[in-house]
Image (cartoon, grey):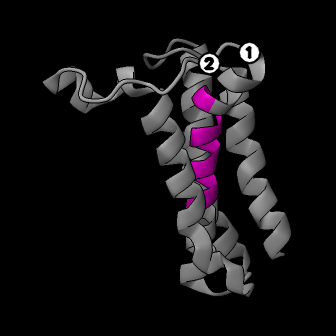
Amino acid sequence: MKKWTIFWWIPLLKGCLIYGLFRTETLVYNKLFGNLFTPLTSPHTFLEKVIVFSVPGGLWAMSYTLLIFHIRKDKTFKSIIWSIIIPIIGIISEISQFYLLIPGTFDLIDLIMYIIFPIIVIMLIL
């Protein structure tokens, strides 16, 4: 098992920082208590919007995937299945938004992030 799976918290922290620093108007505590924090800047270009709105979800899915491999310390099929549970939930939620089964806005880039980031981890580990 790769020793770098111990760094599962890095993508989690990066996702939280992107979300907290650039999407503060959507944070629950700001809605409850008023605007405690204001965004550093607003995304304008397509790449900035992808980074602010889609990358955090992919980073969180990546963090979960790394964490499962770190906890299980093996490369078995069972570990792979456990490591993709949360990304699959993200994929199902995006598809459900497309078909209006759950509230929200379908975003193809979010769907791609939920697929790509965990695949990167799995490819690097196997």
Left or right relative to 116: residue 42: left
Left or right relative to 77: residue 104: left
Q: Secondary structure at mark 1?
A: loop
Q: Residue furthest left?
A: 33
Quadrant of the image for the N terminus? bottom right
Q: Residue drawn at (45%, 20%), measured in percent from left and top? A: 102
Task: Using a 10 Å C-alpha cutoff, classify the residue at mark 1 as few (fewer than 14 neighbours), some (14 to 19) or many (20 or more).
Answer: few
In the image, is residue 116 above or below residue 51? below
* Total tally of numbered discs in the picture: 2
Say which residue label 2 marks. Answer: 43
Residue 7 percent coordinates (x, y): 60, 73
Residue 18 percent coordinates (x, y): 53, 39
The secondary structure making up most of the magenta span is helix
Q: Residue drawn at (78%, 46%), measured in percent from left and top? A: 116
Whether residue 65 is in magenta: the answer is no
Q: Residue furthest front?
A: 40
**Span colored in magenta:** 52-64
Residue 70 percent coordinates (x, y): 59, 80
Pick the front one: 57 or 50: 50
**Quarter where residue 121 is shown:** bottom right
Q: Residue drawn at (31%, 29%), measured in percent from left and top? A: 37
In the image, is residue 16 above or below residue 49? below
Residue 92 percent coordinates (x, y): 59, 34
Residue 45 numbered tag: 1
Left or right relative to 23: residue 115: right
Pick the front one: 84 or 52: 52
Quadrant of the image for the C terminus? bottom right
